[in-house]
Image (tube, grey):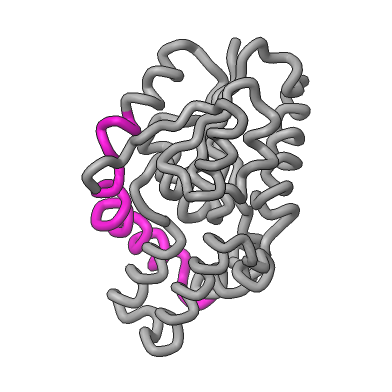
């Protein structure tokens, strides 16, 4: 059996689910555009620059989950999938995931974006395993804080290792392993697999891929 890991934003989807979720909530009138839109884009620029404080960002990202009843959040999430996420999924991305699933690989979606947003996206691709930042709950209500290690940078490695260990595996158990990502923030996990793949990579990851002879893949051409 082989191991296949996928990043989400700008990898399996042609966009960023975090940014899109905030924009969607602004569009629904659930968030104030003047207060949220600029901060949303600032955090995204920091992510791309490698200067993101993940805990500061999560305070921002998870706060809306505390402000509305779960039934309302679930309804918005369903609409968000239809309006924002499915249009960002290309046939090439679906085909890539299907190829690995049909080969009976152990497949997981590994993303810093919180699991409330990303669980339906994993299901959309037919991916059973999701390793994402977990929004903490108390008595069924979101607290606005993450639970455990956020799945970001070296945190992705720690979370994947813990997931594998829970099943009695480690990276060395797999003859071949893949991780697909667009971002240099994922270099720690890319360096753990036998087949690192740079998908529509940022400039830093593209340079690293050229230097190390990693495959470079385009999934979102024309979008």
Q: Where is residue 14 in the image (x, y as percent from the top left)?
A: 34, 48
Q: Residue at x 65, y 52 (%)?
A: 152
Residue 21 belongs to magenta span: no
Quadrant hosting residue 25: bottom left
Question: Is 120 displayed left or right of 83 in the figure?
Answer: right
Q: In which quarter of the image is the N terminus?
A: top right
Residue 41 sits above or below residue 4 on the image: below
Q: Position of residue 157 (x, y in %)?
A: 71, 40
Residues 216 and 20: in front is: 216
Q: Residue at x 64, y 21 (%)?
A: 194
Q: Residue at x 46, y 71 (%)?
A: 69
Residue 76 belongs to magenta span: yes
Residues 45 and 13: in front is: 45
Can residue 93 be spotted in the picture?
yes
Q: Where is residue 195 in the image (x, y as percent from the top left)?
A: 58, 23
Can residue 129 be spotted in the picture?
no
Q: What stretch is highlighted in magenta?
A: 66-94
Residue 99 sits above or below residue 110 on the image: above
Q: Which residue is drawn at 49% across and 74% down?
A: 64
């Amino acid at each position: 059996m082989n191991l296949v890991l996928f990043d989400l934003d700008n990898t399996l989807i042609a966009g960023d689910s975090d940014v899109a979720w905030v924009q969607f909530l602004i569009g629904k009138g659930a968030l104030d555009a003047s207060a949220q839109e600029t901060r949303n884009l600032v955090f995204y620029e920091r992510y791309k620059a490698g200067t993101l404080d993940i805990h500061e960002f999560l305070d921002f990202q998870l706060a809306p989950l505390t402000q509305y009843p779960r039934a309302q959040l679930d309804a918005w999430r369903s609409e968000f999938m239809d309006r924002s996420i499915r249009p960002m999924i290309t046939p090439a991305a679906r085909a890539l995931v299907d190829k690995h699933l049909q080969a009976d690989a152990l497949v997981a979606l590994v993303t810093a974006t919180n699991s409330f947003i990303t669980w339906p996206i994993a299901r959309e691709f037919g991916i059973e395993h999701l390793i994402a930042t977990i929004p903490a709950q108390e008595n069924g209500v979101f607290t606005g804080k993450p639970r455990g290690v956020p799945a970001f940078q070296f945190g992705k490695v720690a979370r994947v290792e813990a997931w594998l260990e829970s099943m009695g595996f480690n990276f060395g158990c797999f003859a071949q392993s893949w991780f697909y990502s667009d971002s240099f923030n994922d270099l720690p996990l890319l360096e753990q697999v036998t087949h690192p793949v740079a998908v529509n990579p940022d400039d830093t990851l593209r340079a690293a891929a050229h230097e190390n002879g990693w495959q470079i893949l385009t999934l979102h051409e024309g979008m």
